[in-house]
Image (cartoon, rainbow, N blue to C red):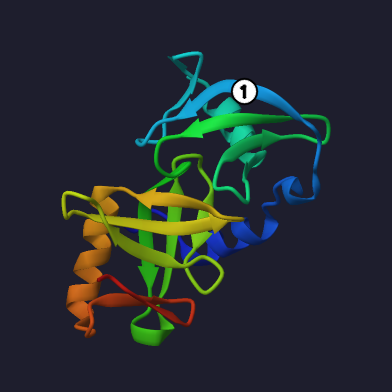
Amino acid sequence: MADFDLAAIAALVAAHTVPPVETWHPAHCGDSHMRIAADGTWFHEGSPIGRAELVRLFSTILRREADGGFVLVTPGEKLDIAVDDAPFVAVAATSEGEGPERRIAFRLNTGDHVLAGPEHPLRVTTAADGTPRPYVRVRGGLDALVNRATFYDLADWALAEGAEPPGLWSGGAFFAFG
């Protein structure tokens, strides 16, 4: 899906900053009563958060802890948040170039963009039922699950390129799919 331009995305990525949550170490204050479902929907006390701007704001203060848990953190407080799978979902991708020159950009459900490469690797795991589970690293231990339609785009590009093992290059790194 080529609904966005890679040069424009690179500029957005370079200009976008998130708070320095990795430097904030307030006392743990409890539970946020929030959950991020596997489909990327954010909930508070069981109700979906309908305002995209609010979800985007919360996503900027999300952090993965050393124990694998997730928290919402500010300079003054830290609250647990439940995450069913990955906290983000990659809902579209675009590709430019071929082979080692290829660059792949993902658009997330929060409106953010990620350029796959060494700092933002793409990986494919296998679920218990044998289905592939593709992810791209967003930042600081936070991943985005690549949705099915977007993974089909990636698979089509990989098959057309014919790499063995199947996979794709992006940002100078090769990411095998199996």
Where 75 falls versus 112 (above or below)? Answer: above
Q: Residues within 10 Å of mark 1 (few under 14, many from 20)?
A: few
Residue 96 is left or right of residue 129, and the answer is: right
Residue 139 at what x, y percent from top left? 59, 56
For residue 161, what is the image quadrant?
bottom left
Is 35 above or below relative to 26? above
Seen at 40% across and 86% down, the residue is 100
Q: Quick one: which residue is furthest to the front in this view?
A: 67
| Residue under the image location 73 percent in, 45 percent down | 21
Indicate the quadrant containing the N terminus: top left, top right, bottom left or bottom right. Answer: bottom left
Residue at the spot 39% in from the left edge and 56% down from the top edge? 135
Q: Residue 177's x, y, as percent? A: 27, 70
The x and y percentages for residue 76 are 83, 30
**Is residue 62 or residue 16 the one in the foreground?**
62
Q: Which corner quadrant of the image does residue 174 belong to?
A: bottom left
Quarter in which the C terminus is drawn: bottom left
Decide: is 126 above or below 158.
above
Compared across the picture, whether 171 is left or right of 14 comes to left
Three-letter code, disc 1: Asp
Q: Which residue is mark 1?
A: 31
Task: Compare residues 14 and 167 and report the one nearer the observer.
Answer: 167
Image: 31 above or below 166: above
For the image, the number of numbered tags is 1
Query: Helix, strand or loop at disc 1?
Result: strand
Q: Position of residue 52 (x, y in %)?
A: 52, 28
Q: Is residue 80 left or right of residue 106?
A: right
